[in-house]
Amino acid sequence: AQKITQTQPGMFVQEKEAVTLDCTYDTSDQSYGLFWYKQPSSGEMIFLIYQGSYDEQNATEGRYSLNFQKARKSANLVISASQLGDSAMYFCAMREGGAGGTSYGKLTFGQGTILTVHP
Amino acid sequence: DGGITQSPKYLFRKEGQNVTLSCEQNLNHDAMYWYRQDPGQGLRLIYYSQIVNDFQKGDIAEGYSVSREKKESFPLTVTSAQKNPTAFYLCASSSPPRQGNTEAFFGQGTRLTVV
């Protein structure tokens, strides 16, 4: 079964508008971490935002925010005020922790969503 | 500057050859990971290591082997048993979860092509 599901293969957004990229996850662990990464055409992986399973507040980093709905097991990325440079592939990832969250565990990725920002 | 270095950037392999991809980090991270990425696809976990001299298979370990003799180094060997090795390979490392934000840092990747 898929651990991380990104159901949107591609998304389009107008410059300066907001966009939401969907991510759902599946785990039986109580302690886990959720990540979003950006991958431009150059191939590098750029870390955007992190949400811990015990964090009560939704994570925010500049124009990026993570809409964390634990009961629904979703961790959607919201990009506000889109810029042309935001065009890239976006990956959701999950690190499953061991007891007490001290284990590194596996870090698994979704299939990604290609975001295209139109001027 | 701290970071992860993968080499080479491009690698060509003949059918039936083993090749080794290098991954070195100077971030003092305990955990290291190898991923494979096919065009337009997500990252699939090949192997990961949480500590020196220990590693675990990921989701697609067949045809690959690793070693972790030093904290800084986690080389990946693509063996002749890997039937379709042409892909982009990414190495990553991360710090323990108890130290707060634990994002994985990635190298620049190695593009392997079978000729």
Image (spheres, grey):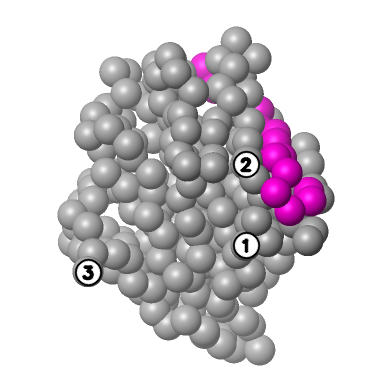
The residue type indicated by label 1 comes to Gly
Dot 3: element: loop
Residue B22 % position (x, y):
36, 74
Dot 2: element: strand
Q: Give the alpha-carbon distance from disc 2 to disc 1, as whole Å.
A: 12 Å
The residue type indicated by label 3 comes to Asp
The dot on residue B1 is 3
Assess disc 2: are there few (<14), some (14-19) or many (≥20) residues with their C-alpha within 10 Å of its C-alpha: many
The residue type indicated by label 2 comes to Ile
Residue at 77% in and 37% down:
A7
Q: Nearer the viewer, mark 2 or mark 3?
A: 2
Residue at 65% in and 45% down:
A81
Residue B94 % position (x, y):
32, 47
Residue B114 % position (x, y):
63, 83
Quarter holding the C terminus of chain B is bottom right
The dot on residue A85 is 1
Quadrant of residue B14 in the image? bottom right
